[in-house]
């Protein structure tokens, strides 16, 4: 199956609210693919990193009447599969799980999902080099923000600094 065929299949299953499991080697663009498809379908995207244990919020969003695409990155790090099972059973929104460790996903959970093995992406927008560079840049931004916030400055001063910092880094447009 070509990358385009896989994308079309995933889109169809998202529209039908089927839970999806995307798996493949580290850096193959699983999460980016899920984001691209959600954006193409015009769905607000909620991304959870399974290692952060945000499962209560996941259950809330999965069962919400507010239509969105839920992406669970690093699904192999989920510790409490019973909450995930509850979200899958009562979901009103499509859920995509992304993992590089298919064996870490319990069989009873896998049986409820449509699974796709993602080969190395052909698109220049997806790939280990770009994904890693973006992740490193995001971490540096967050570290810098945390450092500034940790100085104990007033919220007004912090938000002014944050606005300027995000403009300087190109995350928001500079004011004219």
Image (cartoon, rainbow, N blue to C red):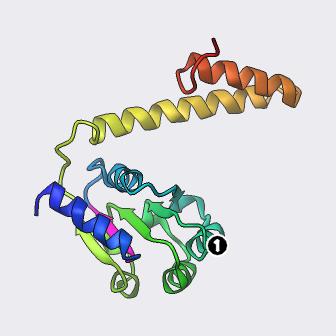
- Helix, strand or loop at label 1? It is helix
In this view, 35 is above or below 54:
above
Residue 43 as seen in the image, left or right of residue 54: left
> Does residue 55 appear anywhere in the picture?
yes
Residue pictured at 47% horizontal, 65% vertical: 77
Locate the N terminus by quadrant: bottom left
Q: Which of 3 and 26 is in front in this view?
A: 3
Q: Is residue 21 magenta?
A: yes
What is the magenta segment's predominant secondary structure? strand
Residue pictured at 39% horizontal, 88% vertical: 108
Q: Does the magenta stretch include residue 55?
A: no
In this view, 63 is above or below 135:
below
Residue pictured at 53% horizontal, 72% vertical: 79
In this view, 37 is above or below 152:
below
- Residue 29: x and y, percent? 30, 49
Q: Residue furthest top?
A: 176
- Residue 16: x and y, percent? 36, 76
Residue 74 as seen in the image, left or right of residue 22: right
Locate the C terminus by quadrant: top right
Residue pictured at 16% horizontal, 44% vertical: 122
Q: Which of 105 and 174 is in front in this view?
A: 174
> Does residue 104 appear anywhere in the picture?
no
Q: Which residue range is magenta in the image?
A: 18-23
- Residue 163: x and y, percent? 69, 24
Residue behind mark 1: 60
């Amino acid at each position: 199956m070509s990358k385009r065929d896989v994308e079309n299949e995933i889109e169809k299953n998202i529209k039908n609210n089927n839970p999806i499991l995307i798996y493949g080697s580290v850096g193959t663009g699983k999460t980016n693919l899920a984001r691209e498809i959600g954006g193409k379908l015009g769905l607000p995207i909620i991304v959870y990193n399974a290692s952060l244990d945000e499962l209560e919020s996941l259950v809330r969003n999965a069962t919400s009447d507010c239509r969105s695409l839920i992406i669970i990155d690093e699904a192999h790090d989920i510790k409490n599969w019973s909450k995930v099972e509850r979200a899958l059973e009562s979901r009103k929104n499509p859920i995509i799980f992304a993992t590089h460790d298919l064996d870490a996903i319990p069989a009873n959970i896998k049986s409820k999902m449509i699974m796709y093995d993602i080969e190395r992406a052909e698109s220049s927008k997806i790939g280990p080099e770009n994904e890693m560079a973006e992740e490193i840049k995001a971490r540096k931004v967050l570290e810098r923000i945390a450092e500034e916030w940790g100085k104990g400055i007033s919220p007004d001063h912090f938000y002014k600094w944050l606005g300027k910092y995000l403009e300087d880094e190109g995350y928001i447009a500079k004011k004219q």
